[in-house]
Image (tube, rainbow, N blue to C red):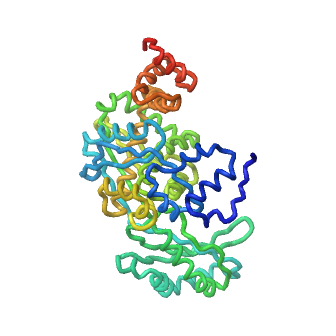
Amino acid sequence: MPVNSRLPGFYKLALDERFAALAEASDADPAVLDDLRPAHEAILPIADGMVENAVGLMPVPLGVGANFRVNGRDLLVPMATEEPSVIAAASNLAQVAREHGGFFCSTSAPLMIAQIQVLDVADPHGASLRLHERRDELLAAADAQDPVLVRLGGGARELQVRVVDGAEQRHVVVHLIVDVGDAMGANAVNTMAEALAPRIAEIARGRVLLRILSNKADLRLARARAVFDAGKLGGAEVVDGIVDAYRLAFDDPYRAATHNKGIMNGISAVVLATGNDTRAVEAGCHSHAVRDGRYTTLSHMERDADGNLVGTLEVPMPVGLVGGATKTHPTARAAVRLLGVETAAELAQVVVAVGLAQNVGALRALATEGIQRGHMTLHARNIAIAAGATAEEVDAVVRRLVAEGTVRADRAEAALAELRAGAPA
């Protein structure tokens, strides 16, 4: 029967009723839909409170990044990702970084920006100064929206006004800069922006439209630095290859996009595992890559005086430990406990360290064996499992695929059939 995407009142149904309605409205086998149900169904009511029309979960493998030492402290890093080789590469390069002390990380203050857009202003520059003249009044009004945040040491810090000349109109854009403490901060700054909008419209003598945070969180930066020993990387030639590969990414946006994607493989895995907003972090990072008007690398690779590789990374990192999925999702809570960080700044430092480790791991693979060899060996496990190999059969199937140099579903099925028929590996 044809699919019917009209589901009136679906959100009002109990969870079990939603499964029945979904089976009736779709052309999928009801047995297949059972796979939407998590193994531990106690989490379903939590999912129902987190998103609309909840019917299940989409589990992502959760692994542990090993060998990490950040600012002198050893950490086990939870990483949620479906992509093979990410956790292995990050862990391997974290081990290399330990030779010279691990990762040295820092953060700026947890400042987030709320934007209030004002239209139809006759005198934009005059409006800008009128708003600056009322700075203290506006900051106090913002703080009044969140006395708990203020009590904890956060709150509104500054007011900036920008006159943005667009193709069709001129915008007056007010930036409210807020110290959000250990929160990601979206709810706090959005609430403040909403509260200030009428007063800002009155002072500017215009019409307020948008009032929302900016994900270009370039006032909330996290930085990581590490020295990767030339000998442990494979020698001076490997260091030279990594630096040359980095230089192409720095010069060419087509390469930079893939270079930065490798960084985000590590960053997004930790952000997701800890229940933070992967889309906000990714938007901020990619906008940072084009801050000088040209899309380029987020990281930098250099040789030090001893010939070792020095890797550095600076990115916006709006992550938090207060509110959101970090507090409501039991897996995220467990991941944060495993990691053992107590502040958003500590979490941001770990995230950026993992991004740097993953980046250097990818560059080393590219500069030596090529990215496919290690990646496809791990990918072969996915193919073998999809072909129906049991836990006891997976390794043997993978060995056959790798030996052939062909990692495809049809070859995995054939290799599995040969294995079960007793053909020698």
Give the quadrant of the C terminus.
Answer: top left
Instruction: Name the residue located 39 percent from the left edge and 51 percent from the top edge.
Output: 352
Q: Is residue 370 visible?
A: no
- In the rendered image of this protein, does residue 359 appear above or below residue 402? below
Q: Position of residue 34 (x, y in %)?
A: 55, 47
Q: Is residue 175 visible?
A: yes
Task: Choose between 360 and 18: the one closer to the eye.
Answer: 18
- In the rendered image of this protein, does residue 336 appear above or below residue 370? below
Task: Choose between 404 and 202: the one closer to the eye.
Answer: 404
Q: Position of residue 110 (x, y in %)?
A: 41, 67
Task: Choose between 346 and 337: the one closer to the eye.
Answer: 337
> Which image quadrant is residue 198 in?
bottom right
- In the rendered image of this protein, does residue 367 appear above or below residue 176? above
Q: Position of residue 195 (x, y in %)?
A: 55, 82
How many marks on residues?
0
Q: Position of residue 294 (x, y in %)?
A: 57, 50
